[in-house]
């Protein structure tokens, strides 16, 4: 049985919001079964904002959620770390409206979860197993998910820039591969867009410490962590944005030139297309490395909600 997990103890970190430029303290706290991932704005009487597709609000270069008057911005890298490490239930306390950007990747959040430790709870985890393809296109941007026995992402990007005309990567997501191959990949932006973003009140906290910045011909930072760090970061983003479906996905996500708006709409579309998936429990770790394909068939199929 794959059991729901939470953290063993509370942990916190401080950083700045990429877009707000404000200092923020974030605390991850253990939460009970079926709680899911919920943000709490301590500066707003503890209003809770669930990490759910129905709560998506702003999508300006990051994914934002809102509940009543409370909003929480730039949630995607933290959500990716929680999904990537199999943390189902956690309360995320913030004293500001934006999750800190840290170094622009999910590595700090992986470190934080490891500091807290993982605790297994008493109830099975339910996966969203895709049984029929679901797809969404907007112009030249597309995203789809196909039945598969694993959680896998194929991402391709193309930009009018010599360093990233085309990058494509297929990554099977396990806890180990997420930590090693995806979590360290940093967000990126173009120098020529920085001024424009700042005029809109965005990227106020952005710097070479928390983003790869692309000039006309190369990166302004001291090198890359991976040759294809850009597309790896897009995989990180889509894993985080699709956390908004509320269950770990078993399926093959294929995306081309997507962004947060497309990912978040797709999370909503997946939930609406309830004929295309089943909620399942598994007798063994289905996202682990040693899984035989037959385990996927042996999962207990639960009725769709
Ligand atoms: Zn990102």
Image: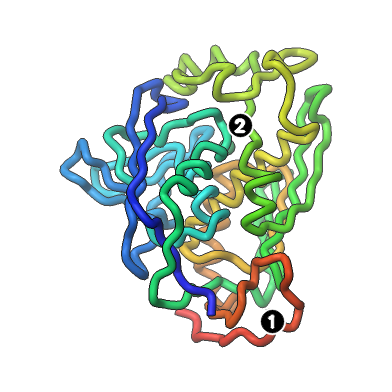
Instruction: State the mark number for residue 187.
Output: 2
For the residue pair 118 and 133, the one nearer the viewer reads as 118
Q: CA separation, marks 2 and 1?
A: 35 Å
Residue 41: quarter of image: top left
The residue drawn where x is 45% and y is 58% is 118
Ligand 1: quadrant of the figure: top right
Mark 1, ligand 1, within 8 Å: the answer is no
Residue 228: quarter of image: top right
The residue at which mark 1 appears reads as 295
Asked if residue 91 can be seen in this view, the reply is: no
Disc 1 is placed on an element classified as helix
**Residue 34: % across, % down:** 36, 69
The residue drawn where x is 65% and y is 23% is 212
Number of the front mark, 2 or 1 = 1
Count neighbours of disc 2 (C-alpha within 10 A) and say few if under 14, some if 14 to 19, many if 20 or more.
many
Q: In the shown orientation, is residue 294 left or right of residue 85?
A: right
Image quadrant holding the C terminus, namely bottom left
Residue 43: quarter of image: top left
Position of residue 118 relative to residue 95, above or below, is: below
Q: In the shown orientation, is residue 190 left or right of residue 240?
A: right
């Amino acid at each position: 049985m794959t059991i729901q997990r939470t953290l063993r103890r509370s942990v916190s970190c401080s950083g700045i919001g990429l877009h707000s430029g404000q200092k923020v303290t974030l605390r991850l706290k253990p939460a009970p079964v079926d709680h899911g991932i919920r943000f709490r704005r301590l500066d707003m009487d503890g209003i809770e904002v669930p990490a759910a597709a129905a709560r998506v609000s702003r999508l300006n270069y990051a994914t934002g959620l809102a509940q009543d008057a409370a909003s929480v911005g730039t949630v995607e890298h933290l959500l990716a770390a929680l999904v990537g490490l199999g943390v189902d239930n956690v309360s995320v306390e913030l004293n500001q409206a934006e999750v800190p950007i840290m170094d622009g990747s999910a590595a700090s959040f992986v470190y934080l979860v490891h500091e807290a430790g993982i605790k297994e709870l008493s109830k099975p985890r339910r996966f969203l197993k895709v049984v029929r393809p679901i797809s969404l296109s907007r112009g030249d941007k597309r995203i789809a998910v196909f039945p598969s026995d694993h959680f896998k992402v194929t991402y391709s990007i193309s930009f009018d820039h010599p360093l990233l005309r085309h990058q494509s990567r297929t990554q099977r997501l396990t806890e180990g591969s997420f930590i090693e191959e995806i979590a360290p990949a940093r967000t990126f932006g173009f120098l020529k867009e920085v001024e424009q973003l700042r005029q809109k009140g965005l990227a106020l906290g952005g710097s070479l410490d928390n983003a790869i910045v692309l000039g006309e011909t190369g990166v302004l930072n001291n090198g890359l962590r991976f040759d294809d760090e850009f597309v790896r970061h897009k995989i990180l983003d889509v894993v985080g944005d699709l956390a908004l479906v509320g269950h770990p996905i078993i399926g093959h996500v294929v995306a081309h030139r997507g962004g947060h708006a497309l990912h978040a709409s797709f999370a909503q579309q997946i939930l609406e297309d309830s004929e295309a998936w089943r909620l399942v429990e598994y007798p063994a770790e289905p996202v682990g490395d040693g899984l035989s394909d037959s385990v996927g068939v042996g999962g207990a199929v639960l009725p769709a909600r």
